Image: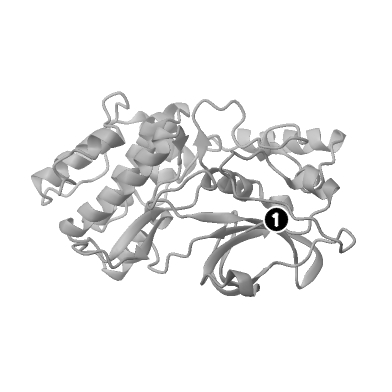
Amino acid sequence: ISVKEITKSSFEIAQRKKPAAATITVEDNDNGGRINSSSWVKSLLLGRGAYGSVYLAKSKSEKHQTGVRAIKTAEISHASSLMDEGRFLIRLQSPFIVRCYGVEIAREEEDDQCMLYNLILEYCSGKTIADLIEDNHGELLESEVKVFARDVLSGLTYIHDRNIIHCDIKPDNLLLSPTHVRFRSTGYLTKIGDFGLAMEKGSVEYGNGYDRKRGTTSYMASKLMAHGIVDFGSDVWAFGYTVLEIGNSCSHKRGTTRYMAPELMAHGIVDFGSDVWAFGCTMLEMLSGISVWGEYGDLDSDDWVNLIGHSDRMPHVPVWLSKEALDFLSRCLERDVNKRWSTHSLKNHPFVLL
């Protein structure tokens, strides 16, 4: 998939630094410098979130009749998270990670002035782990959870080995792809998706992949993101965003609150262990059918910080689970991050071994 028909000036604004393995290209054209509408036909709306919408889509080109894809799309002025997601996904090639086929910058067909950033993704028709839990009205069989756990651990190990922290592991972000592999009782392959909050360990400015744009992506003004325009207003926008964050004690923390690790809630520390804790919360929900920390209801941000970050309380774990399952969860849900197991260690735990 290529970013089609972009003029040199547009390219300087929109193009990002990419690793050598990236498949994004820019093609010359003689259409007077216009950017055409998308080369994909969107159909069913699959979902809508804070960072964009996801549609089922097929290619308009007869040369690319490769079946359906999922198109994750957002207006380019609000697509910083989507761009970051694409930057990570384009580097990752694993059966346990949702595949990214490339990106596309195009005009909205119904609004010629609206520019879209489209991420072309593998379509996983089996929904998500969250859907599976809901459809089963509660807990899943331990034998099934073991298979899902092995898949997710394989995906997490793959990204951690490449110095990437997902930062938002939860049932909604674990997609199911139907498979016909023999001896696979679930009938699905589990794939990690939604890398919009992911970060690279050790990076100074998370998500700042622009050549021409100066600043931290999350604080950039819309006209800077869309057109590369820098003026005094850029500082005012960033200042306003900073004030907004000061009023939100959880704003600097990445992820979904109830899946956040204690060290993340208490001190804002993000590391591979944060993903392991969130993975443990996800496994607990699969095994119990109960939302993690669900007994506390809806809390405000300060109460979440006190509960997860500063108390000695633990998520409720049903005692009727098998000894192997209980021990596995205890290795994931360890408050001391230095004692929490890594994904490499968890892959060798008896609970997930064949």
171 vs 57: above or below: above
Question: From this viewpoint, which residue is outermost toward the right?
Answer: 32
Front residue of this view, candidates 95 and 337: 95
For image coordinates 61% across by 47% down, the residue present is: 81
Residue 253 visible to an observer of this rendering: no
Label 1 sits on a secondary structure element that is loop
Q: Is residue 189 left or right of residue 209?
A: left
The residue at the point 36 percent across, 62 percent down is 176
x and y percentages locating residue 226 in the rendered image? 78, 48
Q: Foreground residue, 329 or 192?
A: 192
Q: Amino acid at mark 1?
A: Val
Residue 37 vs residue 294, the one in the foreground: 37
Q: Residue at x 29, y 32 (%)?
A: 342
Placement of 15 over or under 180, stated as above or below: above
Check the image and report above or below for 57 versus 319. Answer: below
The location of residue 6, given as percent across then percent down, is 79, 54
Task: Quickly name the residue at label 1.
Answer: 3
The image quadrant of residue 225 is top right
207, 100: nearer the viewer = 100
The percent coordinates of residue 94 (x first, y second) are: 41, 49
Quarter of the image where one finds residue 303: top left
* Quadrant location, the N terminus: bottom right
Q: Answer whether residue 220 is visible to the viewer in this image.
A: yes
Residue 66 percent location from the top left of the image: 53, 69
Q: How many marks?
A: 1
